[in-house]
Amino acid sequence: MSIHIGADSGQIAPYVLMPGDPLRAKWIAEHYLEDAKLYSDVRNMFGYTGTYKGLEVSVQGSGMGMPSFAIYGTELFNDFGVQTIVRVGSCGALNTDVKLRDVILASGACTDSGMNRLRFEGVDFAPIADFELLRTAYDVAAANKMPTHVGNILSSDSFYNDRAELTTRLTEYGVLAVEMEAAALYTLAAKYGRKALAICTVSDHVITGEATSSQEREQSFSDMIEVALETVLT
Ligand code: HPA
């Protein structure tokens, strides 16, 4: 048991997929894992362990934003010895070459978060993905002909903000999309010497204002889960 995860040691697999939404964790467990068992429902932030093609895999909701993500990520790495976390989430596109439903593999995550500024006392730490996971995920997505982009994203503390000029500048500097968790994941993986990757599907377009329907979100979410599971299996 850790403070926020009601599991016994050994109930969580070395490989964990983390969607923001705990109901997505349930959905992944029910649709993709065999013999999935709920190991925690503390705060309704569900976590399940089951098997995928014989490999033990867990799925744990993270909640939205870096403070919430960091609680679960820290406890998974520190209290449960988790070796690999793959975030499976959604993002808003910041680049017109990126289309709705495309998959983004975040090689790096810029952040406006105060968390890293406090942690590194003003030094701008660069949170990056594990290269092997990134390469494997890219190969899996390419083999399945999924429209995939690899590059920098922004992990922001705010979903709603008044920073149109900053957003434009980030686009000019090649930042592909915005979400709210990857920088915390990559920083924690660096702290604990573990592996991490954030995979996001584009749910909305910050520049064009387009958004996916709930049916499209479900389909693109499925594509992403398959990439994530095949990546940890490889
Ligand atoms: N901003 C932040 N996080 C997001 C967005 C967004 O536009 N879309 C999906 N996650």
Image (tube, rainbow, N blue to C red):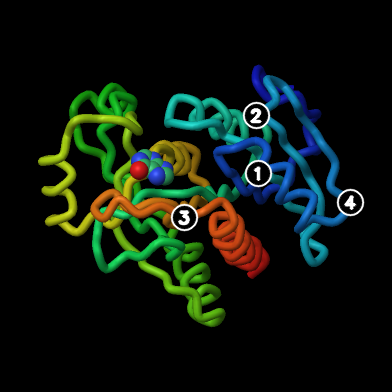
For marks 3 and 4, the one nearer the N-term is: 4
- How far across and how far down the image is residue 36, in percent? 84, 47
Front-most of 130 and 106?
106
For marks 3 and 1, the one nearer the N-term is: 1
Quarter-wise, where is residue 152 in the image?
bottom left
Q: Which residue in the protein does label 2 denote?
A: 79
**What kind of residue is marked 2?**
Asp
**What kind of residue is marked 3?**
Thr
Q: Which residue in the protein does label 1 denote?
A: 24
For marks 4 and 2, the one nearer the N-term is: 4
Q: CA distance from mark 1 to mark 4?
A: 17 Å
Q: Quadrant of ligand 1?
A: top left
Q: CA distance from mark 2 to mark 1?
A: 23 Å
Q: Which residue in the protein does label 3 denote?
A: 212
- Give the structural element (helix, strand or loop) at label 1: helix
**Going 41% across and 49% down the picture, which residue do you hit?**
91
Residue 35's tag is: 4
Q: CA distance from mark 2 to mark 3?
A: 37 Å
Outermost residue, top direction?
3
Q: CA distance from mark 3 to mark 1?
A: 17 Å
- How far across and how far down the image is residue 229, in percent? 65, 62
